[in-house]
Image (cartoon, rainbow, N blue to C red):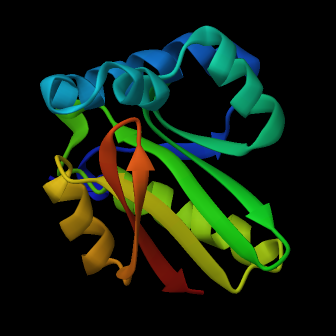
């Protein structure tokens, strides 16, 4: 299925989207819970408090079908470099190009902010996400850091 067969709209998130964003993150990452450390999983799916903080400090987009949040992504920028976090799509919307639309929209926002490069980090359990990012021009930088006891792999793309 693709976007043409199921209409979506992407817009900046607001505080009123908080519970729907938390739900989207929780449902998207639930299949990987056992492969994450407890602290790593909590940092990934967020809490109301950490989401509130993110809404204040990051540019968050939501993908909507009608009024329902079906996907989300967050971005920050520092000078000419952007960084993505929290990409998630509801399981029933996987394969519908929602992630690609979110990625395009957030990259367009980063370009409009003067970014020339974007990074993101992902964990080993998220093999499908790694393939998705690689298909969309991201490459492993070789940087691996610790994410609550798990390897965190950095990906980079020139915009």
Residue 15: x and y in percent read 74, 18
Residue 53: x and y in percent read 75, 25
| Residue 46 vertical placement versus 85 (above, below) | above
Residue 55: x and y in percent read 74, 30
Q: Is residue 64 left or right of residue 29?
A: right
Which residue appears at 72% of the width and 78% of the height? Answer: 111
| Residue 104 vertical placement versus 159 (above, below) | above
Pick whichever, 50 or 11, lies toward us.
50
| Residue 28 vertical placement versus 95 (above, below) | above
The C terminus lies in which quarter of the figure? Answer: bottom right
Which residue appears at 16% of the width and 46% of the height? Answer: 125
Which of the 4 image quarters holds residue 35?
top left
Number of numbered callouts drawn = 0
Which residue appears at 28% of the width and 30% of the height? Answer: 28
Which of the 4 image quarters holds residue 51?
top right
Residue 25: x and y in percent read 39, 27
Q: Is residue 155 left or right of residue 56?
A: left
| Residue 159 vertical placement versus 59 (above, below) | below
Which residue appears at 28% of the width and 77% of the height? Answer: 134
Which of the 4 image quarters holds residue 41?
top left
Q: Is residue 125 left or right of residue 103?
A: left
């Amino acid at each position: 299925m693709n976007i043409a067969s199921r209409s979506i709209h992407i817009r900046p998130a607001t505080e009123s989207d908080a519970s729907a964003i938390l739900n989207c993150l929780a449902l998207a990452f639930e299949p990987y819970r056992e492969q994450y450390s407890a602290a790593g999983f909590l940092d990934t799916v967020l809490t109301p408090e950490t989401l509130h903080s993110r809404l204040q400090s990051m540019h968050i987009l939501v993908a909507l079908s009608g009024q329902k949040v079906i996907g989300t992504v967050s971005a920050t920028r520092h000078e000419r470099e952007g960084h993505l976090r929290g990409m998630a799509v509801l399981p029933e919307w996987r394969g519908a190009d929602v992630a690609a639309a979110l990625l395009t929209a957030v990259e367009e926002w980063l370009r409009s902010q003067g970014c020339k490069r974007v990074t993101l980090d992902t964990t080993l359990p998220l093999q499908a996400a790694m393939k998705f990012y690689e298909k969309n021009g991201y490459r492993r930088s070789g940087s691996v850091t610790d994410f609550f006891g798990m390897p965190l792999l950095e990906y980079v793309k020139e915009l």
